[in-house]
Image (cartoon, rainbow, N blue to C red):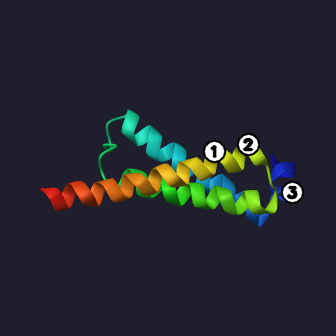
Amino acid sequence: MAAILETLTLADAVGSFGALVVVAAYFATQMRMMNSDDLAFPVLNLAGSILIVYSLLQNFNLASMLIESFWILISMIGIVQFFRLRRAR
């Protein structure tokens, strides 16, 4: 474990934190601690994905960049939809 921490770059740390944010949001919805209709869910997913993309810009991986790009797009759609539905009420 110490060897891993010694080779950890800032980009690795930022991307790892982003992954934890995304997984934590998903876990919170599965445990019914957060509703996927809440604004927090797409915001956390967006923030986590942006952090992951930061790490991917340092250590590029096409497949990961594609999935994160879609994750960002879907999260942004979720945020827009949240405000549209709120305005309609």
Q: Which residue type does callout 3 highlight?
A: Thr
Residue 75 x %, y %: 46, 52
- Helix, strand or loop at label 3? It is helix
Instruction: Give the camera-side residue of 55 and 21.
Output: 55
First in residue order: circle 1 vs circle 3: 3
Taking the image as drawn, is residue 39 in sight? no
- Helix, strand or loop at label 2? It is helix
Label 2: which residue?
Answer: 63
Taking the image as drawn, is residue 38 in sight? yes
Residue in the image at 34% along x and 43% along y: 36
Label 3: which residue?
Answer: 7
Q: Residue furthest left?
A: 89
For label 2, the crowd category at 10 Å Cα-Cα, with few meaning under 14, some 14 to 19 and many 20 or more, is few
Label 1: which residue?
Answer: 67
Q: Which residue type does callout 1 highlight?
A: Ile
For label 3, the crowd category at 10 Å Cα-Cα, with few meaning under 14, some 14 to 19 and many 20 or more, is few
Residue in the image at 65% along x and 56% along y: 52
Q: Which residue type does callout 2 highlight?
A: Ala
Q: Residue furthest bottom?
A: 10
